[in-house]
Image (cartoon, rainbow, N blue to C red):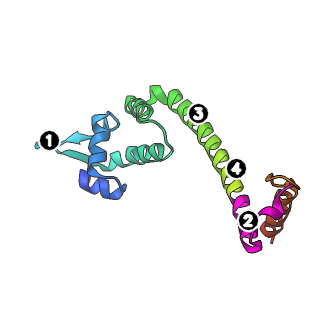
Amino acid sequence: MKNYSIGEIAQKYQLSVATLRYYDEKGLLPFVKRNEYGQRIFTADDLGYLEVIACLKKSAIPLKDIKVFMQWCIQGDSTLPKRYEFMVSQEEILEQKINVLQANLEFLRWKKWYYAQAKTAGSEKMFFKTGTTQVDSKWRQKYLLEASENSSK
């Protein structure tokens, strides 16, 4: 079975060696062995664990939670229900974050359209309700209609 150095793993997962050492110090890599010189040695079996850690980290899951999850993985089949529930709850959290980000993206696209129109007109006053600086909702509706028509093409 092939062994990998910490440098090879860092390159493969686009992490710094310092980050991997930090993860190990924090208990996220309980599976990692050391050679006779004290150097961390990763095996092909470890790659699956590292892939899970990378995904969980990119999903903004706190390191302390990843540590617990990795400990469950090492403990084996008796922790399968806990690991399943962890993934279910993290999926729900990530879906909520995605929904918030999607809503933010949609709002930013509306504002981009708004400013493009105002820039072309040389003023945003055309969007305001008479006598105010409040944007008339008809403009948002116009944008949504145009966006809907463009997405169906």
Which residue is the site of mark 4?
Answer: 103
Q: Which residue is mark 1?
A: 38
**Residue 16, percent across and down?**
30, 52
Magenta-colored segment: predominant secondary structure:
helix
Asked if residue 39 shows in the view, the reply is yes
In front: label 4 or label 1: 4
Q: CA distance from mark 2 to mark 3?
A: 36 Å
At label 4, the amino acid type is Ala
Give how far apart the Cα atoms at labels 4 and 2 are: 15 Å
Amino acid type of the residue that numbered disc 1 sits on in the rendered structure: Gly
Q: Is residue 4 visible?
A: no
Mark 3 burial class by Cα count in 10 Å: few <14, some 14-19, many 20+: few
Q: Which residues are magenta?
A: 109-129
Q: Residue furthest left?
A: 37
Dot 3 and dot 4 residues touching (CB under 8 Å): no
* Distance from the alpha carbon under mark 3 to that under mark 1: 37 Å
**Distance of mark 3 from mark 4, alpha carbons?**
21 Å
Label of residue 89 in the image: 3
Residue 43 place in picture, x, y as percent: 28, 48
Amino acid of disc 3: Ser
Q: Earlier in the sequence, mark 3 or mark 4?
A: 3
Q: Report, in whole angstroms, how far the alpha carbon at label 4 lies from the one at label 1.
A: 49 Å
